[in-house]
Image (spheres, helix red, strand yellow):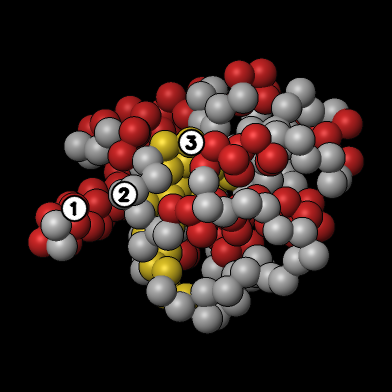
Amino acid sequence: MLINQQGQFLKSKIEYPAENYEILKKEAVKCERCHLCETCKQVVIGEGSLDNKIMLIGEAPGAVEDEKGRPFVGRAGKLLDKVIQAAGIERKNLYITNIVKCRPPKNRKPTIEEAKVCSPILKAEFKIIKPKVIVPLGSTALNQLIDNNASITEARGKWYQKGDFFFLPTFHPAYLLRNKNMKKHFWRDFKLIKKALNRIEELKQKNK
């Protein structure tokens, strides 16, 4: 796992700048720390709101994401957009990223070592966003962020806490393209996320 029970990331010899998103992105796209850089077209860092404290974290970029340099813009991303829009959420109000920032060959599942090597970028994203709610999308994100042995079918829709972070895992939208009968669970989970987003907005307004 990349995060311990106290909400702390694994220690790494590498630290990315975490004071400014644009500076982080400029440094992150230069990454050549693992062999994935040899087969991918570019590093795909997260995008979205830096202020609303909600992060969606998937597995890794796919072919379309690798081509365009943006997370979740392929078929799975379009499904994600439809669901969050139906739940009354604007994509721009979420920060969306992946565990691994480079596309693995043939869209295979990232290895544990690849996730570890890439974790300093994710750590910097956490420091910038300071998320209150993290949504692991699919088993890879679930296993890397919450529990190595957890099953996404059993863990989805349940709240988990590590330090100051609250996690609500759900299915990866790519899984729903193959298992359309699971969309109703995905929809229910995003209604919970909408409630969390509303609560965060309420607290922001009170603190103004």
Q: Which residue is mark 1?
A: 201
Q: Does the residue at mark 2 contact the one at mark 1 (Cβ under 8 Å)?
A: yes
Do we see residue 112 in this rendering? Answer: no
Against 11, residue 76 (above or below) is: above
Residue receiving disc 3: 47
CA distance separating discs 1 and 3: 20 Å
Any part of residue 118 in sight: yes
Q: Position of residue 152 (x, y in %)?
A: 52, 58
Who comes first in sequence, dot 2 or dot 1?
2
Q: Position of residue 34 (x, y in %)?
A: 86, 45
Residue at horizontal 27 percent and vertical 33 percent from the top: 90
The front one of 56 and 207 is 207
- The residue indicated by pointer 2 is 52
| Image point (65%, 66%), residue name | 2
Q: Quadrant of the C terminus?
A: bottom left
Residue that sits furthest to the left in the current view? 206
Left or right, 46 with reference to 61: left
Q: Secondary structure at mark 3?
A: strand
Residue type for callout 3: Glu
Pick whichever, 79 or 45, lies toward us. 45
Q: Residues within 10 Å of mark 1 (few under 14, many from 20)?
A: some
Question: In 3D space, how far apart are the residues under numbered discs 3 and 2 (Cα atoms)?
Answer: 12 Å
Question: Which element carries disc 2, helix, strand or loop?
Answer: loop
